[in-house]
Image (tube, helix red, strand yellow):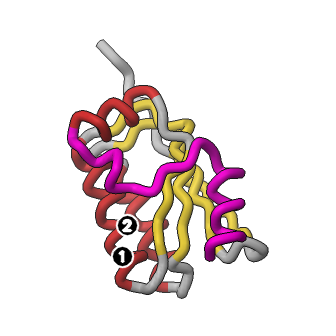
Amino acid sequence: MTMSRELFVDVAHHHDAGCAVVTVTGDIDRTSSPLLRGAVDRLVSGGQARIVIDVKGVTFCDSTGLRTFLSGMNATFEAGGWLRLAGVGGHLERLLQITDLHSFFIIDSDVAGSLASARTRG
């Protein structure tokens, strides 16, 4: 029997790069994904449409989590921005590949790479 790992979401604003970084640790599933969705929705409704989601600490993600990422990407795009995933690996990388969504997202190896791209490419 596996134990669920509680989801934690932390938001940091990087004004020099013009974006926010949402750091996610734990499991993203149907019970926890509203926490992540809410953080992204608050950022977009507050005028921050350029978002990096640091998923390095994600230990599990199900289809609800994938829908949360897709919803966030759509919301940022509609607001004139973008959503990037940073630190994709392990279970999440496999899930993105199996569902053929790996090439759908902008994926950076780490947050530093995402911030560098945000600074140079806007």
For the residues bearing labels 1 and 2, Cβ distance under 8 angstroms = yes
Using residue 52 as the reference point, say whether residue 60 is left or right of it: left
Image point 37% across, 67% down: which residue? 73
Is 83 drawn above or below residue 59 in the view shown?
below
The image position of residue 4, as x and y in percent, is 38, 29
Q: Which residues are magenta?
A: 99-122
Q: Position of residue 104 (x, y in %)?
A: 32, 55
**Mark 2 — residue?**
72
User: Looking at numbered disc 1 in the image, what kind of residue is underneath it?
Assistant: Ala
Q: Is residue 11 left or right of residue 61?
A: right
Q: Name the residue rendered at 64%, 62% in the picture.
A: 117
Instruction: Name the residue rendered at 64%, 68% in the picture.
Output: 118
Judged from the image, the secondary structure of the residue bearing numbered disc 2 is helix
Q: Is residue 122 above or below residue 31?
A: below
Q: Quadrant of the C terminus?
A: bottom right
Asked if 19 appears above or below 114 in the picture, the reply is below
The percent position of residue 1, horizontal first and vertical second, equals 29, 12
Q: List the residue tagged with mark 1.
A: 75
